[in-house]
Amino acid sequence: MELIDTWIKKVPRFFRSRKLTIYLISMVVVFSFIGTIIPQQHIFTHTHMEEMKNQSVFLDYMDTIGFTAIYTSWLFFGVMLLLYLNTIFCTYDMFRNSIRKLKHGSKFRKKDGISGLANNALVVLDRTSGQPRNEILSTLEKRRYRVEQKDHSFVATKNRFGVFGTPLFHLCILLVLGAILYGGVGRMEGRLQLVEGQTLYEQHQDYFYVAEGPLFDEKHRDFGFILERFHPRYEDEEGVYRGATSEILIIENDKVVKKDVVHSNHLIDYKDVTLFQNEYGFAPLFLLKNESGAVISGSYVYAEDDGGGRYLTVFPVADTGLTAQITLYPNTSRKILESGYDMPLNPQVYLELFEGDEQVFNGVLRLNQLVKLGNYPGMGEITLGFYDLKYWSIISVVSDHGIPFIFGGIYLAIFSMIVMFFFSPKHLWAVFEEDRDGRPVLYIGGKSDRYRSSFEFEFKNLVEGIQEALENGST
């Protein structure tokens, strides 16, 4: 029984420790540093990540222990959970101390307690104790002090509930941390790479990259996304330039349920997912045809910008054993349609074909041009042609139920900071007594929880105001 009582006392003492807070925050900083210097899976595609791991034994080891997905690991969530519990206990202590301060500030003080304050004064009264009392109380109430009387003593307070500013701020931290934990364990972030006109669904297999929290448990939905049109230079209805923009159709049960645009200043929300604009590029269409013109295979391939106005990609050519490497030059000329759509004209590709490491072809293809590949078993004489060019866009799809609570915590934190800095609690105590010469006097003193130098000035003005009210005989 004694052992249980000992642990009951030790557990709260452990979690309210400020040393524990420092250790946990240090660990969060270390994990953030790790997430900065070690490539993370939520930044790179699966293919790129696999290539980097194949080239680095260190990165492969970091991936094995989970450091390439540090922010969704149980280790990180464990540290955040401990920090959350630590903040709960510390916040509880702060609220308890604030309640104690609130009660203590409302207690009456005697002459010795008032004289011991840093801000105190002695006011000699020339009247009977009745009339000066009313004038003094009226002076304080005009300065928005809340006054309580008891016999010959009174206590006055202003902004008394400001003592809860600091614990309220920590309560907001709790809300934000809780939202991060709640949202993180059930969070999902995926990326869809869509060619204009293509439809992909909010399903695991349609994402080229997806990161899921430990408790997400494949809770995907059955609605889909269509990239209706992509605009590299978009202007809205008011003529404001918005940059790269994707027109998205959201479909559910084969019906369009929402149509909107997504760009850097505008997101799309549908149910519990949010869509972000990410990267974009060009997607040339290559078709493999037989001698009768029938399509054997083909698809749009994703060409990425190399930073110099060229777009590069590599892809296998069906069952031929050939690998195609293309360099796309899309904007030899272009046309802006009335709808604002930027349509490339006369695009060209520099095509290189490799059989193993040996180059078997290189040359320039314009739109609707083709190259003969020869006779292949089961396919006959085949050709590879460049037949169309569209834009592709990467749309990030995020489901995070903790985001509204994070914003709620931030707004409450701003409110608590206003309380902390603009509503500093102020306390005044006073008592009517007689001095050694038998004159009626008023001992008055006060203090402020913050901004003590400014309160010293306020206290002097208050005493002068009381003396002036006594001299004038009215307020």
Image (tube, helix red, strand yellow):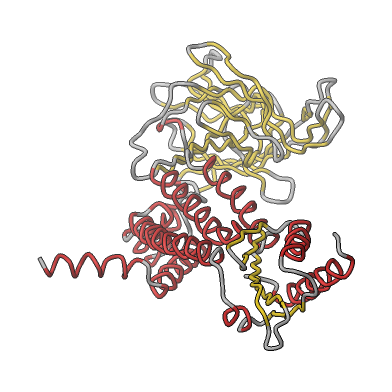
Observer-nearest of 303 and 289 = 303
- In the image, residue 266 sits, relative to residue 136, either above or below, namely above
Residue 54 visible to an observer of this rendering: no
The residue positioned 64% from the left and 67% from the top of the image is 427
Quadrant where the C terminus sits is bottom right
Give percent across and percent down for residue 55: 43, 61
Quadrant where the N terminus sits is bottom left
Observer-nearest of 23 and 445 = 445
Residue 397 visible to an observer of this rendering: yes
The residue positioned 62% from the left and 25% from the top of the image is 227
- In the image, residue 88 sits, relative to residue 207, either above or below, namely below
Give percent across and percent down for residue 376: 43, 27
* Residue 96 falls in image quadrant: bottom left
Q: Is residue 136 left or right of residue 97?
A: right
- What residue occupies the far bottom of the structure in this picture? 436
Observer-nearest of 271 and 198 = 271
Q: Is residue 35 left or right of residue 135?
A: left
- What residue occupies the far right of the structure in this picture? 472
Give percent across and percent down for residue 206: 45, 30
- In the image, residue 241 sits, relative to residue 106, either above or below, namely above
